[in-house]
Image: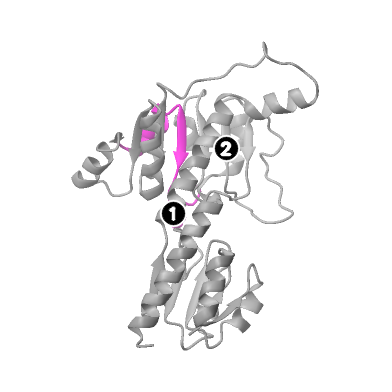
Amino acid sequence: MKILIVSPVSDHAVAALGKKHEVVSAFNAPQEEIRRQIVDCDVLVFRSGPDINADIMQCSSRLSLLIRAGSGLDNLDLNYVKNRKIALRRIEAPGARAVAELSFALMLSLARQILRADTLLKQGHWAKHELTGLLLFGKTLGIYGAGNIGATVGQMGAAWGMNVIGCVEAPTTSREQELASVGIQLTNAEDVLSKSDFLSLHVPMKPSTQGLIGKDALALMKSTAFITNLARGGVVDEQALLEALQNERLAGAGMDVHELEGEGHISPLASLPNVILTPHIGSGTIDTQYSIGEEVIAIVDAHDASCGN
């Protein structure tokens, strides 16, 4: 089979696939290059970033398998995939733990003013008696989007002794019971916004979540609350968040995803001392990417076998 990989995956996976198949790596290539390379491909492997639209996919009449090395599908034309009956496999589990741990890294850094402490000490200023912080223990952690990743964050919060509440788009009794079993109380979105000391966002990017956290949502939050976004940048109205932070209607923010991403873009939040910005590295751990690579290999092998090769 011919496999096109348009987003970075672990070297060991690329090497393993190359032993059995024709593998073309076009990491972070422009759309025109992807369109050229996908011709006659059977398999396409991708992550967030490249726009996998109908124009791209229709360039290969042989395309039979898409592998999303992660969870989000906002950069994929799902209607085309469905109409063409192309198999789609997502690799969600490995990234969930990594994203959840980064969520906690951001919360801890915000709560303990770690970046400010680091900056001052490197400048020679011993700010021991100037810096105060907060415990996570006993605080309310709100999970907006308690799916696979969100539930992992909530479970970690419960282990830290936090009061964890969450909301989902389509609540059911069975989902309520599943979340309760890991220490998360299912409630509604308004409760999550208004009661949280730390709000962690984990919803997919789609029309109904575009600008979900805007002026109205932020107005419901405590002025002492912190918000972290490890979902998609468009979920948060960054201008509304900027105004809330500037007017001290929110205590701080940690953002791993942004409305504009890529080289040369500077977030409007960049100048604020109570904001931590990271470049969409939620699942970017060595361990996670190795596990994802292993699953990519297994999925390709199973697909190859099903095709009778």
Q: Which residue is mark 1?
A: 94
Residue farthest to the right, as pictured: 124
Work out whether 159 lies above or below 94: above
**Relative to 219, 273 lies left or right:** right
Q: Residues within 10 Å of mark 1 (few under 14, many from 20)?
A: many
Query: Can you see residue 183?
Result: yes
Going from N to C along the chain, the mark reached first, 2 or 1, is 1
Residues drawn in magenta: 187-211
Residue type, mark 2 in image: Gly
Give residue 65's quadrant in the image.
Answer: bottom left
Give me the residue at 40% from left, 32% from top. 157
- Quadrant showing the C terminus: bottom left
Give me the residue at 56% from left, 86% from top. 39
Q: Which residue is mark 2?
A: 254
Q: Residues within 10 Å of mark 2 (few under 14, many from 20)?
A: many
Spatial CA span between label 2 and label 1: 22 Å
Q: Position of residue 164 (x, y in %)?
A: 35, 31
Residue 197 within the magenta-colored segment of the rendering:
yes
Q: Position of residue 210 (x, y in %)?
A: 49, 52
Looking at this view, is 230 or 99 the one in front? 99
Query: Can you see residue 214?
Result: no
Residue farthest to the top, as pictured: 129
Marks 2 and 1 close (CB-CB < 8 Å): no
Give me the residue at 64% from left, 67% from top. 28
Give residue 84's quadrant in the image.
Answer: bottom left
Give me the residue at 80% from left, 25% from top. 123
